[in-house]
């Protein structure tokens, strides 16, 4: 579990990144979960965009994917959301967590 200060710092970092996943009418499937898991291992912080034709809202998609990937939801605004999952090998955001 991350604190509100850590979440705020991650939101600041997420401001400059572009969404790398679009979730549309195909919804959330195993292929999307695997792809997001691989991206989280490499980047630790990812942003995704939920298209209007998706059956889920951005909040629902964020919650489902965070649980499936064992990640932390950082932010949901409009149709976009941000997920974070620590990777001990790269630890790109260690300064936020005091590591």
Image (tube, helix red, strand yellow):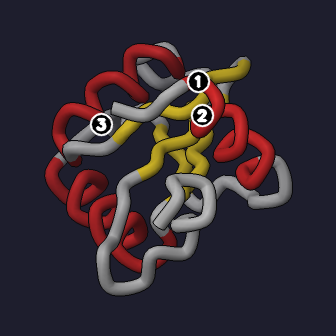
The residue that appears at 51% across and 53% down in the rendered structure is 97
- Between 56 and 19, the one nearer to me in the picture: 19
User: Where in the figure is residue 43, as x and y percent of width and height?
Assistant: 50, 72
Say which residue appears at 52% left-offset and 67% top-offset. Answer: 94
Which one is nearer the viewer's eye here, 58 or 87? Answer: 87
17 up-or-down from 77: above or below: below
Q: Is residue 61 left or right of residue 5?
A: left
Q: Quadrant of the N terminus?
A: top left
Question: Dots 3 and 2: beta carbons under 8 Å?
Answer: no
Reading the chain from its start, which is encountered first: label 3 or label 2?
A: 2
Q: Are marks 2 and 1 in contact (CB under 8 Å)?
A: yes
On the image, which quarter does residue 17 sit in? bottom right
Which element type, helix, strand or loop, lies under badge 1?
A: helix
Q: Which mark is residue 65?
A: 3
Residue marked by disc 1: 4
**Residue furthest right as drawn:** 16
Q: Quadrant of residue 81?
A: top right
Q: Residue at x 75, y 54 (%)?
A: 13
Residue beneath disc 2? 7
Tell me if residue 66 comes above or below residue 84 in the rendering: above
């Amino acid at each position: 579990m991350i604190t509100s200060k850590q979440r705020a710092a991650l939101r600041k970092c997420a401001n400059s990144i572009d969404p790398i996943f679009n979730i549309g009418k195909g919804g959330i499937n195993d292929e999307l979960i695997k792809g997001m898991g691989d991206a989280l291992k490499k980047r630790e912080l990812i942003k995704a965009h939920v298209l209007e034709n998706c059956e889920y809202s951005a909040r629902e998609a964020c919650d489902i994917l965070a649980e499936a990937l064992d990640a932390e939801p950082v932010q949901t605004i409009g149709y976009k959301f941000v997920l974070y999952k620590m990777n001990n090998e790269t630890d790109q955001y260690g300064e936020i967590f005091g590591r």
